[in-house]
Image (cartoon, rainbow, N blue to C red):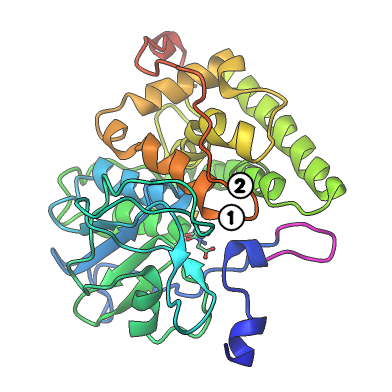
Amino acid sequence: MSEVNKVRPRTTLDEMDESGELKRKKAAWCNWVEPGSESFPPEKDRYHLYISYACPWAHRCLILLKMKGLEDAIGVSVVHPTWQRTKPEEDEHIGWMFRDPSDPPVSNLNGHGSFPCTYCIPDTVNNAKSIRELYEIAGDKEGKYTVPVLWDKKKKTIVSNESSDIILMFNSAFNSIAKNPDLDLYPEDLRKEIDEVNSWIYPRINDGVYRCGFAQKQDAYEKAFDALFESLDRVEEILSKKRYLVGDRITVADIRLFVTLIRFDPVYVVYFKTDQSRIDDYPNMFNYMKEIYQMPAIKPTVIFPHIKTHYLSSHPKLNYYGIIPKGRKVNLDTPHNRDNMTST
Ligand SMILES: N[C@@H](CCC(=O)N[C@@H](CS)C(=O)NCC(=O)O)C(=O)O
């Protein structure tokens, strides 16, 4: 392994500071697709989205793609949920790999478990075997090979690997080719309020669960834990008065929260030790989550087998044998009662 490979952060698990806290680095690729742009104009069949169904950041991009009706305009590939050695002959890096659904099951890095390739969608654009390969084709120098990746097939490069930017591009940049151009999930008049809500939901809830789960010192864990549950109480309070987080209709603020809520009980409570309460202990939040889950564009994007398998099988130090907890049976299709809420 070269010196460079040894020192640079290679996965999220390497991004810890001295106090044992997770400190995420910013995404490296931040171009924008925009109408009129010379570099990245919106065009049908020009861009491709690489995701993991397990990753909440990638999930929010897929949701926006479906809600806006962009599935005929932008292709999607889906990695296997279990991280593997990406170049075992060269270095120790572990990360996302593509598999064909007909491939045999995969084990974790300790050789335990048997995780099927169901729901995977191989990369037919670049024929890459790993997400790392895509970054290498694009000449990436950072070496953190994350999903989502929005790929430009024409320029053969990465447009963006920042989900918070990709969701906004999907919301407005592709309206000329979207089936639902009028759906605006980041409306001008609500932007200030959406950004304000994101400013505490992102660090304390979305990233907050990771700060609990990846903490390497008790203090760091407890600090993240307290911030997380204070903020969930705050969300419950908001949702006891209104149907959605901001304004009178669903916005990106709700999608950003939803992807964490839907993973909370099956994964984070057990795996990230976020065990003060479950989402189904909060009546308003639980019904709100069910309402969003039941939306026709959203339900098919929630693939629990990938969600559970990824976390429990990809960090061999945190879960050596790759045993996946069975969990409680919860029916997310029962009525949610949110239609009775006033919306503002
Ligand atoms: N800034 C990124 C973060 C994406 C991210 O951290 N993705 C994780 C999966 S949930 C990943 O691909 N990690 C691979 C690694 O850490 O090597 C975004 O929100 O788009």
Q: Which residue is mark 2?
A: 319
Q: What is the three-letter code of the residue carrying label 1?
A: Pro
Crowd band around label 1 with a 10 angstrom C-alpha radius: few (<14), some (14–19), many (20+): some
Identify which residue is drawn at 45% across, 50% down.
55
Inspect this view and state whether residue 157 appears: yes
Q: Position of residue 233 (x, y in %)?
A: 69, 25
Q: Does any atom of ligand 1 lie closer than 8 Å to the CB of label 1?
A: no
Tell me residue 68's x, y (percent). Answer: 24, 45
* Image quarter of residue 227: top right
Label placed on residue 94: none
Nearest the eye: 74 or 174: 74
Judge left or right: residue 275 versus residue 40. right
Residue 25 % position (x, y): 62, 68
* Quadrant where the image shows the N terminus: bottom right
Mark drawn on residue 316: 1
Cα separation, mark 1 vs mark 2, equals 5 Å
SS for tag 2? loop
Query: Residue at the spot x=37%, y=9% of the render?
Result: 335
Q: Kindly indicate whether the residue at mark 2 contacts the one at mark 1 (C-beta within 8 angstroms).
A: yes
